Image (cartoon, rainbow, N blue to C red):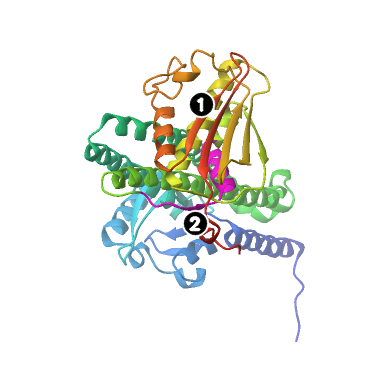
Amino acid sequence: MNLTPLSPFEVQETTAALLDRALVTAFLENVPDLVYFKDREGRFIAVSKSKAERHGLTPAAMVGKSDFDFFSPTHAQWARVDEENIMSTGAPIIGKLEKLTWSDGRKTWALGSKMPLRDESGEIIGTFGLSQDVTKSKQMELELEQAHRELIDASRMAGMAEVATGVLHNVGNVLTSLNVSASVLATGLAEAKAGSLAKLAALLQEHAGELGAFLTADPKGRRVPEFLDSLAQHALAERERLLGEVASMQDNIDHIKEIVSMQQACATMVGVVEPLDAIALLDDAIRMNAGTLVHHDVAVLREFQPVPHVYAEKAKVLQILVNFIRNAKFACDESGHADKTITLRLAPGEADTVCLSVEDNGVGIAPEHLPRIVARGFTTRKTGHGFGLHSSASAAKEMSGSLSVRSDGPGCGATFTLVLPAAPAKATPAAG
C-alpha cells in the first residue's frame, strides 16, 4: 500500500487541529464554572464536565439536547428568547442573575453570561456562555429576611420594649459580620473572570482561520495554554474562598435563628440548658466578630486554662460573649492605640464555676461609671444605647451565673467576665 507523505503545510494544519482540540478538551474538563456551547436551535454542541455533572449526565449525553430537556417550559422559553436576541443583535448578556426552575420542580439561582458563537468568517452560528451557582447565597438572603420577620413577630409576642431592644442589639452584632461576608461575596462575584473568558474567545475567533499557527508561532497565542491554566486555578481558588464566606454567613444566620427562637421560647418555657464547651463558645463568638476585628486591625490573644464544660443555654452565652467582644473592639478603636488587643481568658472559678473573660487595652472605664455600667440605658459611648450589657447581665442571671466588669480607670482597658456553673460530670458529653 502506497502512502503519500503529508506536505509541511498539511502537517502544520494537522498539528494545529490537534492542539486546538486538546486545549478545548482540557478547558471543558477542568473549568469549575458551568460552560456550554449551543447551535442556532439552542441545542448543546459541547458542555463542560461541571455542567454535565450538574445534570447528572456525561458531556456526550448532553449533546443534542436543549434547555427544554432539563428545565421548566417557562424558564426554557425565556432562555431561548435571550439566545435569539443575542444571535440577532450580536450583543452579549453579562452578569445576569436568574432563578432556574428545573423539570422536577427544584428552584436554584445562577449568575451567568451569554455570548454569540461565531464561525471563522464571523457569522453567528449559535451561542455560548458560563454561569456560577449562587443558590446558597440567595437562600441565605431569603433566610435573613425571614429571620428578620420572625424577630419582629417574637418581639411583638413578648410585648416588652426591653426584649425587643435586647434582641435587636444582639442581632445587630451578628449582622455586622454578615455584612462583611456579603460584601466579600458581592466583590468576588463582580470580579469573576467571565470578561477574561470572553476576551479569550474573541481572540481565538479573530485568528480562527489560522488558529494552529497563532497558537504555535504567535507570542500571544503561545500564552493561551498558560492563561487557561491560570484562569482555571483562579476560578478554583475563588470558589473555595467564596464557599468559606457562604459557610460563615450560614453560621451567623443560624445564630440569629437561635436568638429569635430563644426569645419566642422565653414567653412560654425555659430555654434548654446543656453542657457546652467553653472554648468552642469563645471561638464562635470571635468568628462572628471576625470581619469587623480584621477590618479594625484588632489582634486577638487566647489564654485558656483547663476547665470543665459549662451548664448553660448556648444562644444566651453567645449573645453575652459577642456583646463583650463588640464593646472591646469599640474601646480599642476609641483608644487610638496602634497595638489594639483583645485577650480571651478561660479559668476555673469558685464553687464549681467557670470564668469566661474578655479583656481589652482600650479606653477603660472611669471609677464613678463602674457601679452603673450594666444598668439599663446607661452607656459610655456616644453612639451606644445602654441595652447590650443590661441584657447580658439579665441573661447571665437567668442561667444561674453572673456578669462583672473591672477597669483600673481611663486609659487602662477593661475586663468583662461571665461566670457560669460548671456542668455536672455525668452531664458532660463523652469525648470522641
> Which mark's residue is nearer the viewer, 1 or 2?
1
Res 327 label: 1
In the rendered structure, which amino acid carries the disc numbered 2?
Leu
Camera-nearest residue between 181 and 334: 334
Q: Which residue is mark 2?
A: 34
The amino acid type found where label 1 is placed reads Asn
Task: Judge left or right: residue 125 versus residue 218.
Answer: left
Q: Residue at x 41, y 34 (%)?
A: 170
Percent x, y for residue 100?
35, 55
- Segment colored magenta: 271-289
Please say if 100 is above or below 171: below
Question: Which corner quadrant holds the C terminus?
Answer: bottom right
Residue furthest to the front in view is 351
Q: Is residue 401 left or right of residue 70?
A: right
Left or right? Give the position of 56 relative to 218.
Answer: left
- Give the percent coordinates (x, y) of residue 281: 54, 45
Q: Position of residue 324 (x, y in %)?
A: 51, 31
Q: Sequence order check: which comes first, mark 1 or mark 2?
A: 2
Cβ–Cβ below 8 Å for labels 1 and 2? Answer: no
In three-dimensional space, the C-alpha distance between marks 1 and 2, rounded to whole angstroms, equals: 44 Å
Q: Secondary structure at mark 1?
A: helix
Q: Quadrant of residue 163?
A: top left
- Seen at 27% across and 37% down, the residue is 155
Which sits in the foreground, 290 or 273?
A: 273
Crowd band around label 1 with a 10 angstrom C-alpha radius: few (<14), some (14–19), many (20+): many
Residue at x 48%, y 15% (from the top left corner): 369
